Image (cartoon, grey):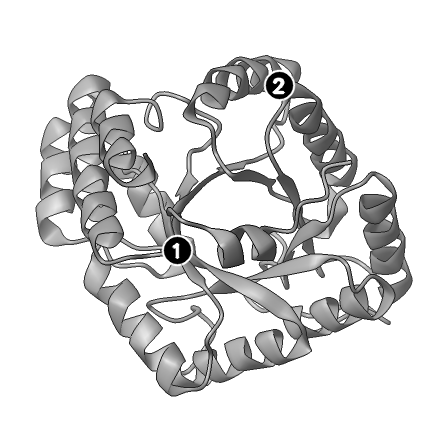
């Protein structure tokens, strides 16, 4: 059983947590690469890892199978994602039951993005409209499951304002969300401002900053086009100048994220969640590991 609740880690921590996010590959070559990367990442001793869930359950079985694989490999705690997209209430009950049956006691609980080609989320017939509804469903059946929820330092793209978005976050917490992991951001002031506003709104759960190392100009612009995060001009210009030089771009991205990590850890964040895109290189880069070592000894 992989049953340690992340909320308990957060309560008892005497150092900041470290976590990584994986995603289910599309083919056998991608799966082989994931196995190699995850084996290397064991040496970083993350406190937990998460595995994303495809729209409409397109990677449902892969998500759970990868969670099983990571558990067997020896990761301390493994957290599957679950989204509302493309599922009826009954199907979400079935998936949550399977997650529980497999011994997992943590779920990253998300509404999910609209299916590819659509710009507005529309719940299926007898589906759920909000992440808060999914948290309620899971907690009603399995109170022993720790539900993580998402926060957006620069607001969700669909929200009219950050204040409105924080009200939605409050609903997820009220439903039973135990901690918050943020969407990626490249300027720490967005995170600190977000935490301040959450606290003023009565949200006191731990807020873990989520970071994605920028590895190329094209990559980072592709991601921010969907999540709404802003890329500082200094970072964007440096990556654009690096062009197709992968090593130069990677060095720029690592240097930037190390500065972010160091500043966040200096200011006492509960942990760092890295969106690693199934790659070990960035998380195990000497500058990154040395930065974490200073705060996680």
For the N terminus, the quadrant is: top right
Identify the residue under disc 2: 31
Estimate the x, y position of residue 99 in percent, counting from the top left.
Answer: 80, 45
Q: Residues within 10 Å of mark 2 (few under 14, many from 20)?
A: some
Which residue lies at the image location 39% right of the left edge and 71% below the top edge? 155
Which residue lies at the image location 38% right of the left edge and 80% below the top edge? 199
For the C terminus, the quadrant is: top left
The correct choice, above or below, for 209 with respect to 52 in the image is: below
Q: Earlier in the sequence, mark 2 or mark 1?
A: 2
Residue toward you, 295 or 124: 295
Taking 67 as reference, is 248 left or right? left
Q: Mark 2 or 1, which is nearer the eye?
A: 1
Estimate the x, y position of residue 185 in percent, counting from the top left.
Answer: 30, 55
Estimate the x, y position of residue 54 in percent, counting from the top left.
Answer: 66, 44
The correct choice, above or below, for 162 with respect to 154 in the image is: below
The correct choice, above or below, for 212 with respect to 263 in the image is: above
User: Which quadrant would residue 161 be assigned to in this image?
Assistant: bottom left
Q: Secondary structure at mark 2?
A: helix
Can the viewer see residue 130 in this picture?
Answer: no
The answer to whether marks 2 and 1 mark residues whose Cβ atoms lie closer than 8 Å is no
Which residue lies at the image location 72% right of the left edge and 61% below the top edge? 84
Q: Secondary structure at mark 1?
A: loop
Return the mark for residue 270.
1
């Amino acid at each position: 059983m992989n049953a340690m609740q992340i909320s308990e880690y957060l309560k008892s921590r005497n150092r900041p947590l470290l976590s990584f996010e994986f995603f289910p590959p599309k083919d056998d070559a991608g799966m082989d690469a994931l196995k190699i990367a995850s084996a290397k990442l064991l040496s970083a001793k993350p406190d937990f890892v998460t595995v994303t869930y495809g729209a409409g359950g397109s990677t449902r079985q892969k998500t759970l199978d990868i969670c099983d694989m990571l558990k067997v490999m020896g990761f301390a705690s493994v957290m599957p994602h679950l989204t509302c997209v493309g599922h009826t209430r009954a199907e979400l009950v079935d998936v949550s039951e399977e997650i529980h049956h497999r011994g997992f006691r943590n779920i990253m609980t998300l509404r999910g993005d609209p299916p590819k080609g659509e710009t507005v989320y529309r719940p299926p017939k007898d589906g759920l409209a909000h992440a808060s509804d999914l948290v309620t469903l899971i907690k009603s059946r399995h109170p022993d499951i720790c539900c993580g929820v998402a926060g957006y330092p620069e607001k969700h793209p669909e929200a009219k304002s950050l204040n409105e978005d924080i009200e939605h976050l409050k609903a997820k917490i009220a439903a039973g969300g135990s901690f918050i992991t943020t969407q990626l951001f490249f300027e720490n002031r967005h995170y600190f401002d977000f935490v301040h506003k959450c606290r003023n709104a009565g949200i006191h759960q731990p807020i873990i900053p989520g970071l994605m190392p920028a590895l190329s100009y094209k990559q980072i612009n592709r991601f921010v086009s969907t999540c709404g995060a802003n890329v500082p001009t200094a970072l964007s210009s440096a990556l654009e100048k690096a062009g197709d030089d992968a090593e130069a771009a990677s060095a720029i991205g690592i240097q930037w994220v190390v500065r972010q990590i160091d500043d966040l850890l200096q200011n006492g964040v509960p942990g760092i969640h890295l969106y690693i895109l199934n790659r070990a290189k960035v998380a195990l880069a000497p500058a990154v590991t040395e930065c974490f070592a200073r705060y996680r000894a």
